[in-house]
């Protein structure tokens, strides 16, 4: 359960960063574009950095140790933000921090999947503790803000959480299961990413993730623009992540009734509905309640992705496969989405139609591109078993010819 404890502590920190760091940057006088630029550095780093960390973890077979190193880097690099108040300095801090922050999810997921198999449980039931941690911290800080608390304490609170996360990472045991295969090389990674079914699946994830950007960086700002009590920001994130926890806990029952690709398509459709409603509603309680669709926006989507990767990526490329998801879906998707969200926010404010409203309207439209890529991934998925009888999880996914089946 040490990985579950790490998830709880680390995502408690994320529960402070995602809802409130952009709002903190606004208190420093940053424009919408400057806020999105500072917040885009993490997804930018995710495009290039996680595959490197993932390949190192696969070659050394020590993902827990690599995770500990990454957590140390995040903790030390975030520390100066407690004193920074200028845009360029904050950008530099966020850029350095992103080099260490970007691989942590992929590395921790690699450890968690192996631990789940050893413990006879599911990945989702370990990962949900991260969601609980996010829920607790976001609601607590929202309540603090509603009581008149200042955003100036946010960097200190995040730094303290990162110290605890590093200490927790140091306690994680190295998974005993070792992959008895030759260490992967770059050509193996290239063969994996050339698979059209695999690549279009990650592109569907990137489109979906880009549509989530207004929620990640503008939600709290949007509520402030609407003059809504800050407590509703905390309630909204609490309800959203609570729904996510329920989905993760019950995912094993959901997947028995709905297969992976239809469930992903349903998640994309409900996410588009969520953004459309958020663009049209000005009531704090309604905006909070609609966040229960986060059960599909993140819960079903993320566990579905991990399930897909576990079934299609060879064991020798476990960390690398998850790093590629982080790079393409989270990194590239987040970078494009953050920049688009910042641009739409400034454009909406300039035309006095509401920056948040315009950003969420555009996000609802963008989300409908994800099912197209998902359909292509479904059509191009490998249908025939490898000639030697091995399953896709043992390498047929990357050893067959590149191109649609």
Image (cartoon, rainbow, N blue to C red):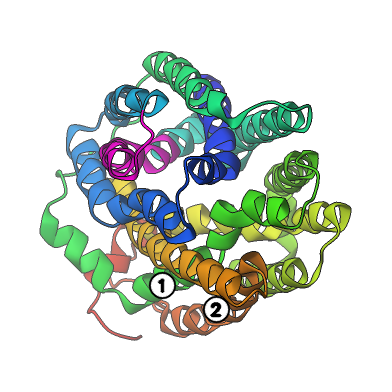
Marker disc for residue 188: none
Q: Nearer the viewer, mark 1 or mark 2?
A: 2
* Dot 1 and dot 2 residues touching (CB under 8 Å): no
Task: Estimate how packed mark 1 is, as few (under 14), some (14 to 19) or many (20 or more) residues with alpha carbons within 10 Å.
Answer: many
Q: Earlier in the sequence, mark 1 or mark 2?
A: 1
**Quadrant of image for the N terminus:** top right
Find out whether residue 98 is within the magenta segment. Answer: yes
The front one of 346 and 391 is 346
Q: Which residue is mark 2?
A: 366
Q: Quadrant of residue 54?
A: top left
Q: Position of residue 155 (x, y in %)?
A: 48, 27
Find out whether residue 203 is within the magenta segment. Answer: no
Q: Which residue is mark 1?
A: 203
Q: Residue at x 49, y 20 (%)?
A: 156
- Measure how far apart labels 1 and 2 are at the Cα level: 13 Å
Q: Residue at x 67, y 45 (%)?
A: 248
**Quadrant of image for the C terminus:** bottom left
Q: Residue at x 17, y 59 (%)?
A: 188
Q: Position of residue 390 (x, y in %)?
A: 33, 61
Check the image and report above or below for 66 versus 228: above
Q: Position of residue 38 (x, y in %)?
A: 38, 49
The residue tagged with tag 2: helix, strand or loop? Answer: helix
Give left or right: position of 53 versus 185: right
Helix, strand or loop for the magenta stretch, by majority? helix
Q: Which residues lie in the magenta part?
A: 84-109
Asked if residue 386 shows in the view, the reply is yes
Check the image and report above or below for 389 versus 371: above
The residue tagged with tag 1: helix, strand or loop? Answer: helix
């Amino acid at each position: 359960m040490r990985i579950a404890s790490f998830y709880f502590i680390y995502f408690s920190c994320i529960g402070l960063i995602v809802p409130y760091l952009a709002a903190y940057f606004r208190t420093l006088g940053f424009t919408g574009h400057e806020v999105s630029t500072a917040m885009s550095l993490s997804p930018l780093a995710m495009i290039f950095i996680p595959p490197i960390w993932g390949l190192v973890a696969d070659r050394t077979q020590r993902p827990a140790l690599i995770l500990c190193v990454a957590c140390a880097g995040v903790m030390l690099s975030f520390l100066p933000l407690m004193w920074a108040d200028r845009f360029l300095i904050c950008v530099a801090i966020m850029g350095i921090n992103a080099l260490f922050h970007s691989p942590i999810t992929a590395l921790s997921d690699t450890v968690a999947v192996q631990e789940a198999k050893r413990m006879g449980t599911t990945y989702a039931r370990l990962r949900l503790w991260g969601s609980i941690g996010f829920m607790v911290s976001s609601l607590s800080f929202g309540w603090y803000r509603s009581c008149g608390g200042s955003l100036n304490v946010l960097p200190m609170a995040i730094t303290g959480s990162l110290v605890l996360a590093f200490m927790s990472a140091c306690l994680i045991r190295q998974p005993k299961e070792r992959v008895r295969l030759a260490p992967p090389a770059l050509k193996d990674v290239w063969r994996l990413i050339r698979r059209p079914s695999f690549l279009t699946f990650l592109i569907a994830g990137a489109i979906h993730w880009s549509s989530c950007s207004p929620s990640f960086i503008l939600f709290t700002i949007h509520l402030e623009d609407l003059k809504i009590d800050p407590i509703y920001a905390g309630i909204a994130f609490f309800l959203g992540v609570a729904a996510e926890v329920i989905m993760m806990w019950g995912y094993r029952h959901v997947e028995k009734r709905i297969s992976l690709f239809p469930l992903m398509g349903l998640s994309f459709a409900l996410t588009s509905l969520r953004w459309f409603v958020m663009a049209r509603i000005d009531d704090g309680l309604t905006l909070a309640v609609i966040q229960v669709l986060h059960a599909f926006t993140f819960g079903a989507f993320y566990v579905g992705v991990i399930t897909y990767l576990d079934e299609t990526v060879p064991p020798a490329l476990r960390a690398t496969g998850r790093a590629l998801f982080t790079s393409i879906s989270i990194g590239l998707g987040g970078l494009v989405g953050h920049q688009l969200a910042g641009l739409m926010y400034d454009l909406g404010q300039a035309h006095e139609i509401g920056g948040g409203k315009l950003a969420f309207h555009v996000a609802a439209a963008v989300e409908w591109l994800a099912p197209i890529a998902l359909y292509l991934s479904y059509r191009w998925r490998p249908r025939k078993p490898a000639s030697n009888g091995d399953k896709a999880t043992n390498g047929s996914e990357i050893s067959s010819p590149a191109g649609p089946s």
